[in-house]
């Protein structure tokens, strides 16, 4: 089994891959202050609850939170006796990167592109709903063409709540109508439907520059927006993890060839 770890700013997703499917995936708050032993205690419980043996053959991580990296590396070394391989910016994973500079693209975005290319024919647009919402564009030749970054729904709306004392915090669900009949529905219209409109507008612009192609969603809120955005055609919950597995295989192959 291979352990894939996707460290995001808000959540970290762990997945166990058996070579053909995911045996289990778990989501946990990203906590840089945790030690390797605390991580192991929680992860051991997840293995046990899933009926899985406490053993892996390898591990790959894509992280946008450097403060988490040492504890995760020690977790794998101490508790699994395997090294943790990190997908680093600039790693050669068999995909051309047209970004400038090419090593400025985060590991999560490279993993998203690799996962998307394994499932769909390019051109492809990946929309990852995380702390920031990112758009990753893959052109007809299968190259990473670039993308866009905008504030995530949670942090964007939190800024509104923090600065407007009388506005209540609301659940991120669509209201019955775009015309809100009360403050909660008016907020949900602006926040949720407005955000969906922004996603559609940017996705269409990117599709226009790519010459079409499928638009897929991933990330924590991706499923919520699948039915709200006209451009989103699929939701792939494990896309980033799958990209990490592909990267691990390609990095291992390139290491053997050196």
Image (tube, helix red, strand yellow):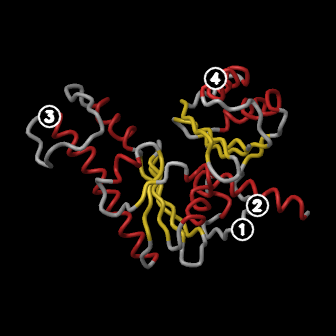
Say which residue label 2 marks: 250
Q: Are marks 3 and 2 in contact (CB under 8 Å)?
A: no
Q: Is residue 77 left or right of residue 27?
A: right
Check the image and report above or below for 68 versus 149.
above
Q: Earlier in the sequence, mark 3 or mark 2?
A: 3
Q: Is residue 110 left or right of residue 82?
A: left
Q: CA distance from mark 4 to mark 1?
A: 36 Å
Q: Are marks 4 and 1 in contact (CB under 8 Å)?
A: no
Say which residue label 1 marks: 94
Q: Earlier in the sequence, mark 4 or mark 1?
A: 4
Q: CA distance from mark 4 to mark 3?
A: 42 Å
Front label number (4 vs 1): 4
Q: Earlier in the sequence, mark 2 or mark 4?
A: 4
Q: Residue furthest front?
A: 51
> Tag 4, which secondary structure?
helix
**Which residue is drawn at the image coordinates 41% and 72% (left, top)?**
207
Q: Earlier in the sequence, mark 2 or mark 1?
A: 1
Q: Are marks 2 and 1 in contact (CB under 8 Å)?
A: yes
Front label number (3 vs 2): 2
Check the image and report above or below for 110 versus 138.
above
Say which residue label 4 marks: 45
Front label number (4 vs 3): 4
């Amino acid at each position: 089994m291979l352990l894939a770890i996707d460290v995001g700013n808000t959540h970290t997703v762990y997945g166990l891959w058996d070579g053909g499917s995911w045996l289990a995936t778990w989501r946990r708050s990203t906590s840089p202050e945790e030690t390797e032993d605390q991580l192991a205690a929680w992860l051991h419980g997840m293995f046990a609850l899933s009926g899985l043996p406490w053993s892996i053959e390898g591990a790959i991580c894509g992280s946008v939170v450097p403060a988490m990296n040492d504890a995760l590396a020690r977790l794998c070394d101490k508790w699994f006796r395997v090294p943790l391989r990190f997908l680093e910016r600039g790693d050669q994973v068999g995909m051309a990167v047209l970004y400038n500079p090419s090593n400025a693209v985060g590991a999560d975005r490279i993993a998203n592109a690799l996962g998307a290319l394994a499932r769909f024919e390019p051109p492809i647009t990946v929309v990852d709903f995380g702390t920031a919402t990112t758009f990753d564009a893959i052109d007809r030749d299968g190259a990473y063409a670039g993308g866009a970054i905008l504030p995530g729904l949670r942090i964007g709306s939190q800024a509104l709540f923090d600065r407007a004392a009388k506005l209540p915090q609301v659940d991120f669900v669509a209201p019955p109508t775009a015309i809100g009949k009360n403050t909660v529905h008016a907020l949900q219209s602006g926040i949720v439907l407005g955000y969906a409109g922004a996603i559609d507008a940017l996705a269409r612009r990117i599709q226009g520059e790519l010459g079409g192609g499928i638009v897929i969603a991933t990330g924590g809120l991706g499923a919520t927006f699948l039915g709200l955005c006209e451009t989103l055609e699929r939701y792939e919950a494990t896309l980033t993890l799958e990209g990490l597995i592909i990267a691990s295989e390609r990095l291992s192959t390139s290491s053997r060839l050196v």
